[in-house]
Amino acid sequence: MTASTAQALSIDEVSRDSGIGKDTLRVWERRYGFPQPLRNDNGERNYPADQMHRLRAICRLLDAGLRPGSVVPLDAEALASLSEASGGVDARLDPSLDHVLASLTTQDPSRIRQQLQALLTKQGPEAFVLQSVAPLVTKAGQLWAQGSMPIYREHLLSQQLMSVLHSAIPEVQPPEGGLQVLLTTLPGESHAIGLMMVELLLRLQGFETINLGVETPVDQVVAACTDLQPSVLALSFSSQQKRAPLMASLCELEKRVPRETVLIAGGEGVARLRSVPSRVTVIKSLDKLAPALRAIKRQHGRIR
Amino acid sequence: MTASTAQALSIDEVSRDSGIGKDTLRVWERRYGFPQPLRNDNGERNYPADQMHRLRAICRLLDAGLRPGSVVPLDAEALASLSEASGGVDARLDPSLDHVLASLTTQDPSRIRQQLQALLTKQGPEAFVLQSVAPLVTKAGQLWAQGSMPIYREHLLSQQLMSVLHSAIPEVQPPEGGLQVLLTTLPGESHAIGLMMVELLLRLQGFETINLGVETPVDQVVAACTDLQPSVLALSFSSQQKRAPLMASLCELEKRVPRETVLIAGGEGVARLRSVPSRVTVIKSLDKLAPALRAIKRQHGRIR
DNA sequence: ATCTTGTTTTGTCTAGGACAAAGTGCGATA
DNA sequence: TATCGCACTTTGTCCTAGACAAAACAAGAT
């Protein structure tokens, strides 16, 4: 509960930083023998830093689709070789983007923003989102998972990206009478940047956007839809999300959101669902967004 | 664990939405007899919506300084009268700000941004932050706590405020050779808007700012400071933070952050601490920030 | 090949006990 | 009269160990 003495993390801290529930950490210890934290005078678990690293490696493999029983008990070496085997293949980046990542490591982070801004003006908003922002976010996430980039640099990059996006979004003013889209994520999903990419793309398609930000409780999403009566409700899910509660949330939304509202869901978390409620349109990747929306616009025009 | 059947919330959902830990919910039930959830076939707790409302009322009173033992057992009526007694006195808002809040309830949220933008150009950045943004955030928080504003509207307001701030920040370019300030919050503190207000104010003071965003783990803050060597590390704490872990974090930062870096901490969460580590400068309210920073700048000039 | 049916894995829940840190009250001291 | 130190109470979080439903998998039948 108390301070982390520079090296030993409490179960709460480990749970926060790794995203693994406290109960899960305890049950892994019981079942698989890992993690095996030290205990302080009070019998509380104290996780050394190296176990934390190992947990991160485990998380990455779980995200890649492996199962806990076959991953958690492995020692550091086995994990490393598995990582290499599963995650090795990787899309390379455009050289100009590598340049941005390089700037992250120098002592002058303010240059990143300039570079991004330059990319934006050169590529235009749509290409910027699809070809620069999305790959950068993915790549940074991978680098972090591999342990080759500290989290704070990923934060830093996200922050600069969001800054540029935040400036770009109001520039694109939707035409009069554009359809309204409500954007948000559900509780547990705290990545704002996906939402902003979508927002910018939507505006380019002539939609009016209302961004509620992240982690809006389901009943609040329902309330917002009831009050604002948007034509479309767009939700973003990252890969962290568990499937069961995700499905449950989608079903509840389908039931309670006004009939007139079209539901669309995107992000990695939802791409791997087998089936979704019938009213929900799934956007499997960002570049599928624009076509899907054109379809929605056509349909909507017909109904009215 | 599974879906909430429209009305009955699982302990996980209640914990998320109310911000009260799962263990705490269970121990309150044991000690004070409230909340007293229904049970599903599996013996799991199912919280009806009205208990959720009551929990929110309780949270508000706890934030106001009352103690759980004297608040949690109370029934709805007693809570209501207590709320009236404790929270009644309240700073009123400037008429132009009331206007903004009114726009929140209409169906046209895009107007809010225009209004805020107008305020910004009229008042200038500093006054905008101190006299518009901060009061609006406070007021919206109060309205939400009272139950007279749905959360999603508070989200909406924050989002618009952040949008305007995000646009305003790059406009203020620090002079050459300005001191670098690293901005972030620690895990558990997810309010980005305070950070952005501070960032804008700092830039107006001629500092170069690097915003890491929210919820950076302590060791990552240390890593960032070691790598980037900023002159100042600025942390923001809202009132949600518990005192003990807050102090622990501050102490650890004091120990591990490079000596040359000045530590400053602000926000309601830190204003009510009795004592802080000696290297940490506490900013009790936003308008104290500018003077404190001028002092730091002077001091720094002398050292170099 | 696709669907149905067992079997195993896995995350989250439950109960009640324990304890340290935070808060409170009271008496003693300057 | 105000401030400090010390005992007492409150309170959040941790602990163990057991249970079970939903998801993932494997195998057999159509």
Image: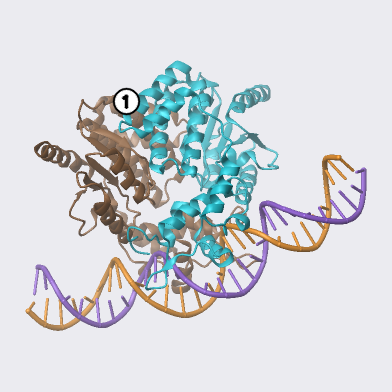
Chain colours: A brown, B cyan, C purple, D orange
Q: Residues within 10 Å of mark 1 (few under 14, many from 20)?
A: few
Residue identifier under label 1: A118
Provide the secondary structure element on which disc 1 rests.
helix
Who's the residue at 22% across and 31% down the image?
A204
**Percent position of residue A121, x then y:** 28, 24
Q: Quadrant of the N terminus of chain B?
A: bottom left
Amino acid at pointer 1: Ala
Left or right: where does residue B147 sit relative to residue A64? right
**Percent position of residue B28, x then y:** 55, 62
Query: On the image, which quarter does residue B276 sit in?
Result: top right
Query: On the image, which quarter does residue B49 sit in?
Result: bottom left
**Percent position of residue A44, x then y:** 59, 65
Q: Nearer the viewer, residue A237 or B219?
A: A237
Q: Nearer the viewer, residue B230 or B111?
A: B111
Who's the residue at 65% across and 46% down the image?
B251
Tell me, yes or no, if residue B190 can be seen here. Answer: no
Q: Quadrant of the C terminus of chain B?
A: top right
